[in-house]
Amino acid sequence: MDLGLKGKIALVAASTKGLGKAVALSLAAEGAEVAVNGRHRQNLHDVAEEIRSSTGKSPLQIQADVTKSEDVERMFDEVTKHFGGLHILVTNAGGPPAGEFGDFNDEQWMNAIELTLMSSVRLLRKAAPIMQLQRWGRIVNIVSLTVKQPADNLLLSNTVRASVIGLAKSVSRNLARDNVLVNNVAPYYVSTKRIDYLIEQTASRLGITTDSALQNIVKEIPLGRLGTPEEFGNLVAFLCSEKNSYMTGSTLQFDGGAFRGMF
C-alpha cells in the first residue's frame, strides 16, 4: 500500500533512539523528508547515518531540547528554512522517572510537566498554523498505555501523559476543519532502552531478577511478546499518511492486547 508520504515533510521530536527513531525510519522508508531531533550531536549523527543506509534519505539533524521554548522555536525555523514547509509532526520526549506519590517534590513534578506536557504544547503551537495554512497536516503524540491503564510505580507518567490526551482531543476539534488530524498512540512494552530501564526498576522494587520481571510483563500480553519498534513506527506512519483521512482525536493503544478496558 502506498501511504502517500512521498515528498511530505516530517518533524519527529526526540528521534535519536527508541520509539522516536523507529517513527523517523518508517516515515523515511515511505518517502517522507524527515527532520530528526535530539539533544546530543553524536546521537543525531548516528541516527542520520542509520536512516541514510536503510532508506537512502538524508534527514535534517536538529540539536535541540524540547523542554526549552527557544529551542522549539529554532527547530521550526530550521525545518521550514531547509524544506520550505511542514506536513507532519510527531511529538515525543523521554519518559518521566519511575516512582510513587511520596517520591517526588514540586520541582520534579514541574520537570515532568515541562518534559511531557509543555513540550507537546509548544510543538503543536508552532506546527498548527503552518498546517492550517496549507489545509493539510498530521500530528501524532507518542504517549503511553498509562493514559488508559495507570501503571504501578509510574505516578508522573500516569498523571502528566493524560494531560496530553486532553490537549490533543481539544486541539483536534479546532483543527479538523482545516484537514489537520491529531491523534495519539499509547504504547505498552516495546523493546527499547526505556523499557529496559522500567524492567530494571520493577525488578529492584520487587526484589526479583530482571528476567523474572520481564516474564511477568509478557504474561500480561495476550500476544505473548513485547512489541517491536518497527511495528510501532509502521502504525504511526499510517496515522501520518494520506490513507488516514478520517481518524482524529483518537488514542490507539499499541499493546499486544494487554489493555483490559473496553474503550
Image (cartoon, rainbow, N blue to C red):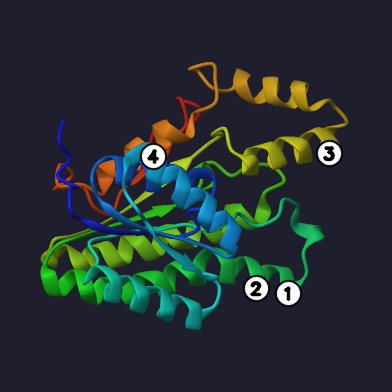
Q: Which residue is mark 2?
A: 110
Q: Secondary structure at mark 2?
A: helix
| Label 2 with label 4: CB-CB less than 8 Å | no
Q: Which residue is mark 1?
A: 107
Q: Which mark is residue 205?
A: 3
| Label 1 with label 2: CB-CB less than 8 Å | yes
Q: Which residue is mark 4?
A: 233
| Label 3 with label 1: CB-CB less than 8 Å | no
What amino acid is labelled 1 in the image? Glu
x%, y% of residue 168? 35, 61
Q: Secondary structure at mark 3?
A: helix
Q: Quadrant of residue 8?
A: bottom left
**First reached walking from the N terminus: tag 1 or tag 4:** 1
On screen, residue 133 above or below 60: below
x%, y% of residue 104? 77, 64
What amino acid is labelled 2 in the image? Met
Mark 3–mark 1 distance (CA, rounded to whole Å) = 23 Å
What amino acid is labelled 3 in the image? Arg
